[in-house]
Amino acid sequence: MPLLPDRGVDPLYTTVTPILYPDSSAHATGFFYTELDDTESEEVDLDSADIYLVTNHHAVADENGNPISDSIRIMTRPDSQDLTNLQYHDITLESDDGEQQWLEHPQGSEIDVVAVPLNIDLDGTGTRVISNQLRLPDNIKIQFGQEAAVLGYPIRGQSPYLPIARNAMIASSYGVPFQGLPCFATDADMHSGTSGSPVLTRPSALQQTTEGFQLGTQKMFFLGVHSATMQSDHEPEEGPLNINVTWYAELLEDIIRQAN
């Protein structure tokens, strides 16, 4: 293999995992997540934090709410110095007494987001997690047309890889329910396999806030969970709609805290 430039890997890439199914019929995306108290720093203590796999409801359950399979397979990166070293984990979706092993929103499957509690030790590994402290601060405004990134796994195959970042654009009014649901729309060319991907954005250096414009950092913020591409009744020759649904990140707080 030719010598490649060593520029390191953004830690956000290691928060994401493909979700594989026993029959190999399809795949999805998920990411590692934790809720921190307001008093805790952004540096997550993986030795004590409760870790969840976040993905879409339709990635773990069928239309009737039953587990889509007995288990799903995810991967972590046990070696912080070699991110190509992978470890696979099979996550059971139903207990022996038939109880579902994922947490869903109080509104049920209408909110296409779930959190699966994990019993996996990530301390000292090359796997990182997204926390609620990466959510967009309330005083920073997001405008329509602003760029976002969707980190996911659109490619199926036998060769594992770091997730792919797909360019997206904020297409609906951010902070407002889209079509009456707690989600917003993005304009992006998405594919199957990316369901459950985290959606992030990096506000411009000159950020618009509720107090006016101010110089900001180039930090990435977590906006929500990509769900699906919307279907339309347009004629096929008009081309794909490419409008996607992203559920607001704040829903994860409802999901996790109502279960504790």
Image: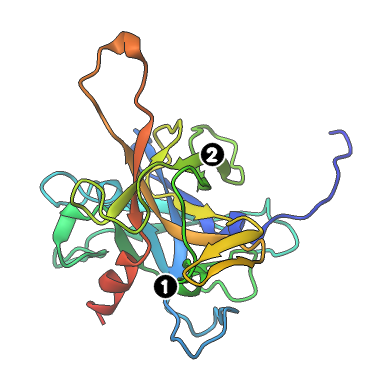
Residue at 43% x, 86% y: name it: 37
Given residues 221 and 59, the one toward you in this image is: 221
Residue at 44% x, 46% y: name it: 144
Question: Residue 43 is drawn in which quadrant?
Answer: bottom right
Q: Is residue 191 visible?
A: yes
Q: Which residue lies furthest to the bottom in this view?
A: 39
Please provide percent x and percent y for residue 220: 59, 60
Location of mark 2 (residue): 166
Position of residue 147 relative to residue 203, above or below, is above
How far apart are the two marked residues, 2 and 1, measured between alpha carbons?
A: 30 Å
Drawn side of residue 129 relative to residue 22, left or right: right
Find residue 119 and name its label.
1
Position of residue 156 relative to residue 94, above or below, is above
Q: Label 2 is placed on what type of residue?
A: Arg
- SS for dot 1: loop
Drawn side of residue 236 relative to residue 65, left or right: right
Badge nearest the viewer, 2 or 1: 2
Residue at 77% x, 55% y: name it: 8
In which quadrant is the C terminus drawn? Answer: bottom left
Find residue 142 and name its label.
none
Assess disc 2: are there few (<14), some (14-19) or many (≥20) residues with their C-alpha within 10 Å of its C-alpha: some
